[in-house]
Image: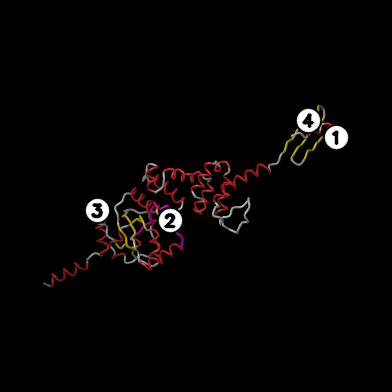
Amino acid sequence: MSKAADKALAESMGRRRPREAIQAEVADSVLAELVPPSTVDLPIESLYRSPFQVRTMGSEDDVAKLAESIQASGMISPIVVRIVPAPNAELQIKQVPKFLMGEKDLTVKSFEIITGHHRVQAAIRLGWTQIPAVIKHMTDAQAAIALTADNAIKKDLTDWDRYQSILMLEQSGACRTGREIAATLGVSASQVTNLRSFGELPVAALEIVRANPDVCAYKLAYKLHNKGFNKSEPALVTEALQRLADRAAKHVMGKDTLDKDDLTAQEQVIPWILGKVAARSTNKTYRRELRINRPGNRAIRVLVTELGATIDAQGLNPELLAKLIEDNLERLTAG
């Protein structure tokens, strides 16, 4: 081979593109529709959280446990992503510093996570700079449905997460009917209706549930709405949920407390509210004031409460007044 040919070959080899870039382009082409999807190693800095992700993210402990599992057994399932031309910068996975930007053709593309948000966090915790992924062709509606369906099978998904999924599927236009939403979430149509009861909670109570999703299951939200307490007793509804959320010092069990440690804590909410309403009615101060007008003199004022009765008047004969009360005592004390 001539020196000129050797030089041309060397230059060609020097311009050889990374395997990851070639794989990503194949996955993003029509060819990808004809062959099974292959796994591509994507830089974590090219990943963006999905705007359709409404699931409450796991705690640091959850991520740590997942990281330990991945470190021990490897990542069994790659994450699923789609290419997005103009992602929201606020959703970028920023924890990993940029690396070798000029040598990575793949970094010019951005990928939205469809499934695997927690796996990405675990990979970051392990110090990974790349993560195995499968690139899919998806519209916004398809991405929203796929992400929701994947979340629906998670054991830690709360009823609040499901309610948020309902709102997201409707607002994004991914689902147009209750039946479509139910099928995506893997629940019945009636349960979708019951889950909507979260939206009826008082504003302050809604914020408590938003911060503490475990304190209110959809059954409790439905009961509070069905009994009309959200409108008639918003303060008590908020207080009850706050008591469940606090988990502060152990309360001594009683009619005025809710014990979060009790397995039926949420079942105590309705009886607790009813008890508060009943106590308020019983303890309500009875007060009735009567005025007897006297021409030319100040009116006689009679005040009756549950503690007794007083007569405010001037010029009355006390002996005669006592006699009149005594003579009419039976009628005065009649139920």
Residue under label 4: 292
> Helix or strand or loop: what does disc 1 sit on?
helix
Precedes in sequence: disc 1 or disc 2: 2
In front of the other: 217 or 262:
262
Residue 321, located in which quarter of the rendered image?
top right
Precedes in sequence: disc 1 or disc 3: 3
Residue range of the region highlighted in magenta in the rendering:
47-61
Q: Amino acid at mark 4?
A: Ile
Position of residue 171 relative to residue 313, above or below, is below
Q: How is the image coloured?
A: secondary structure
Residue plotted at (59% across, 53% down): 258
Residue 128, located in which quarter of the rendered image?
bottom left
Q: Amino acid at mark 3?
A: Glu
Residue plotted at (34% across, 66% down): 99
List x then y, in percent, for residue 253: 62, 54
Q: Tell whether 202 sits left or right of 155.
A: right
List x then y, in percent, for residue 318: 87, 35
Which of labels 2 and 4 is toward the front?
Answer: 2
Residue 322 is labelled as 1
> Helix or strand or loop: what does disc 2 sit on?
loop
Question: Marks 1 and 4, Cα distance to the nearest angstrom?
Answer: 17 Å
> Helix or strand or loop: what does disc 4 sit on?
strand
List x then y, in percent, for residue 80: 33, 57
Tell me the quarter of the image containing the C terminus. top right
Question: Marks 1 and 2, Cα distance to the nearest angstrom?
Answer: 77 Å
Q: Amino acid at mark 1?
A: Ala
- Report if residue 78 lies within the magenta region: no
Which of labels 3 and 4 is toward the front?
Answer: 3
Residue under label 3: 33
Precedes in sequence: disc 3 or disc 4: 3
